[in-house]
Image (tube, grey):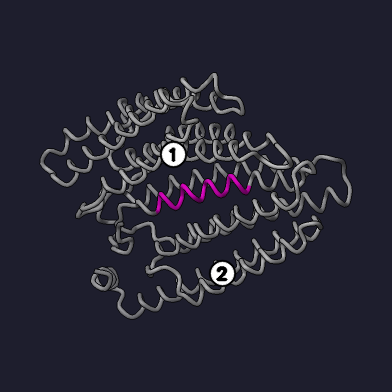
Amino acid sequence: MENPLKIITSNDKEEKKVEFLELIYDLIFVYVLGRNNSLLHSLSGGFVSAWTFMAYILGSLVAIQIWMFSTYYINMFGRNKTRDHIFLFINMYLLYYIAEGTRQHWEGYVTQYYVAWALILVNIGIQYLIESRNHRGDPGILRMTKRMAAVLFGEAVIVLTELAFFEKAGGWIASTAILFGVFGTIFAGTGSKEAVVDFSHLSERAMLYVVFTFGEMIIAIASYFIGGFSASSVYFSLMAFLIVVGLFLSYEMIYDHIIDRELRTTGMSYMIVHIALIFALNNITTSLEFMRDEEVSLLPKTVFLILAFTLCYICLLSLGRYSTVGGGMPGRVLARFVATGAGFVVLMLLFRNNMWVNVALTCAFVFVIFLMLRHFASHIAAHQKDRLAAAPEDHVQSVNKAVE
């Protein structure tokens, strides 16, 4: 896995901008994930059935992985030209078939779902093959582009194999395809001596997708405002709104004040963490909807909410290794986060029958974590200020030398 601490200055290369079409492309994924989240609203015995939840997980990972593949290609080789636009529009069209095939009883939509999925992978793979012709003089990049094409074509073959065995396997091969794509992508970047990823652009794309995911969350909590203007309605709607605000502020604190977007890195682990983060945020969105749904059993929905928040904050804290000072958060700082999280879990389980207390605990927990992240960010800022004051002219060179 890459060393995220090797630093370059912003003057070493021209800054890559996020294009307008990329934002439209990301909105299609928001729609797909919104369709996928609807799977969790079909209850069985007070909660979601194991099969439905597995389908939800696989559907989420399919969409986010496709987004990651596309984002990587655009980041490394995208030129905002006609060819890139055509390939993006093809993928956008095919994603509608995936969205339409995402439903509770989807047996009649299996063919369109898997064929569209495979064609999207082939589409991106073809882009890598075309791009490989432009890098015949650069063995490292040439090897990487060919490996990525092989990974994408290989995953497409696994996806199509699923169609032949769907009735017997019941969709489990899909998880094999996803895992093949994850480990294959890691392998494709192994051994590269120089980073070809524009981390500033990559981190911005990931941030925008997270923001779109928060948009889904904002829409979801609108249900808390239904039911008339009463003390209960105001209290729960306010708590739900503050929870979303606190989560957003925590991510904003990490993105704007902790992450160094001028790092030289392949960005692999950064994107994998964001896949898990977006998945966690989607789960939080659903858990907030569950909390006011009396048909959902108390214990399962409380545990679901706890797990969603736990995964979310594990991802956020993992991004600390991309900070300006590098090395991640110190052990003593992580220990405070863990202790705070453990206290939250215990209190949530103790007060699971009292929703007034439960939602207040969640709100308080979110803002305590935000304040802790803010304190860590101020520590980084002070540390950087001291280092720049000590040796401003040799700062970048000394940091690179230290981490190498």
Mark 2 and mark 1: Cα distance apart in space: 32 Å
Residue found 56% across the figure and 69% down from its top:
338
Q: What is the three-letter code of the residue carrying label 2?
A: Phe
Residue 272 lies within the magenta run: yes
Up-down: is 12 above or below 376?
above
Q: Which mark is residue 175?
A: 1
Mark 2 surroundings: few (<14), some (14-19) or many (≥20) residues within 10 A: some
Residue 382 lies within the magenta run: no
In depth, the one of 167 and 228 nearer the eye is 167
The residue that disc 2 covers is 337
Q: Earlier in the sequence, mark 2 or mark 1?
A: 1
Residue found 49% across the figure and 26% down from its top:
98
391 with respect to 294 (left or right): left
Up-down: is 181 above or below 90?
below
213 with respect to 136 (left or right): right
In depth, the one of 79 and 166 nearer the eye is 166
Residue 320 in percent (x, y) is at 45, 64
Residue found 44% across the figure and 53% down from its top:
273
Q: Secondary structure at mark 2?
A: helix
Q: Main secondary structure of the magenta part?
A: helix
Q: Which mark is residue 147?
A: none
Residue 351 in percent (x, y) is at 77, 62
Mark 1 surroundings: few (<14), some (14-19) or many (≥20) residues within 10 A: some
Q: What is the three-letter code of the residue carrying label 1?
A: Ser
The image quadrant where one finds the N terminus is: bottom left
Nearest to the eye among marks 2 and 1: give it.
1
Residue 305 in percent (x, y) is at 65, 52
Q: Secondary structure at mark 1?
A: helix
